[in-house]
Image: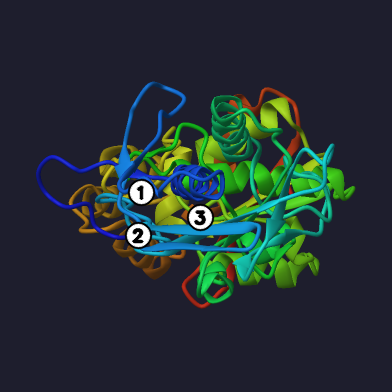
Amino acid sequence: MTRKPEGPLRKGWTTGACATAATRAAWQALLGGAFPDPVCITLPRGETPCFDLVKAETGPGWARASVIKDAGDDPDVTHHAEIIVTVRHAQPGHGISFHAGAGVGIVTKPGLPVAVGEPAINPKPREMMIGQITELATRFGVAADVEIEISIPGGEEIAQKTWNPRLGIVGGLSVLGTTGVVIPFSCSAWIHSIHRGIDVARATGRNHVAGATGKTSESAIQALYDLPDEALLDMGDFAGGMLKYLRKNPVAQVTIAGGFAKLVKLAQGHMDLHSSRSQVDMAKLAETARQSGASENLCDAIKTANTARHVLELCADENVTIARVIARQARETAMATIDGACAIEVVIFDRQGGLIGRAGQF
């Protein structure tokens, strides 16, 4: 995860907000007005950002506008992407329709907020764009019969850095955003993707999903159970975000997989496993080692150990299988959070992907 910069952080704008601004500019131009530049919109919570136009083009029955996305200080992969919207007059009675241009994905799996076969333009951005179309149609005294096409140059390549391929969104990026505002380092996009992964797994009939803290543990748990990609949840550090959503949207069997250090934090009751937001309590870890049969000398050494990995090495030297106890404690934490909605298993892997601790085996 990108390190958070020092000092106050600058907010940014979602792809949905950018698409809405470009839609307003293009539609206004198509209706005979000049391109508004900058173009200003009102977001769902009342913010009124203005966007400079990059493209401002018209032709017979169409107009096109684009803006550059500014994600503020958030490490968003779509920061500085160009969001291009082309609007076209449609046949009378057509209404408003949305289309994916180059770099915008198509939904191919159920469980997402947009139907299979539709462009990956989420409901709130659609609602925002429809609002701009209808407002201007009323002002100019015309029917709101419009085709809206969104494209994002390079979007198909950028999408490989997102969860879209695993969620069954092919061909490019999604147009997202519920408020229109990007809150730097809020991690909302990551947690949103975990939730959508659960939705897709449920909709495709998966009865076993796995959330892993990193790539090594994800690869190891996938191989252990021969799980398909759609059964894998990109949990990362957000155990709480995954478990709380599963409590209300259960899947029969849930495996939590990770390295020793991350799952020590879960065992100690932390729901956010990132190093900047939770720390291993070495005194508690020493007590856990004692329960695993560690000597007093070893427990004393654990209390002053540098890292959880160091603790694992110290325990290995005395053949103390502490990872098994940590797996059991982490499972207890997860079970308390999920409140009986799912069966829980916890599996701990070493840095080479070797299994060193397991509790609640399926």
Label annotation for residue 323: 3
Colour mode of the rendering: rainbow
- Whichever of labels 1 and 3 marks the residue nearer the N terminus, that label is 1
- Whichever of labels 2 and 3 marks the residue nearer the N terminus, that label is 2
Vertical relation: 222 (above or below) 362: below
Between 125 and 2, the one lying in front of the other is 125
CB under 8 Å between callouts 2 and 1?
yes
Residue at left offset 34%, top offset 63%:
80
Of badges 2 and 1, nearer the viewer stands: 2
Residue at left offset 50%, top offset 72%:
153
Instruction: Specify the amino acid type for callout 2.
Output: Met
CB under 8 Å between callouts 1 and 3?
no
Q: Residue at label 1?
A: 274
Mark 2 crowdedness (10 Å alpha carbons): few <14, some 14-19, many ≥20: few
Of badges 1 and 3, nearer the viewer stands: 1
Q: Residue at label 2?
A: 1
Position of residue 111 in the picture relative to residue 213 (left or right): right
Give me the C-alpha separation between circle 1 and circle 3: 19 Å
Instruction: Specify the amino acid type for callout 1.
Output: His
The image quadrant that residue 174 belongs to is bottom right
CB under 8 Å between callouts 2 and 3?
no
Mark 1 residue element: loop
Between 194 and 87, the one lying in front of the other is 87
Residue at left offset 33%, top offset 59%:
311
Q: Position of residue 200 (x, y in %)?
A: 77, 48
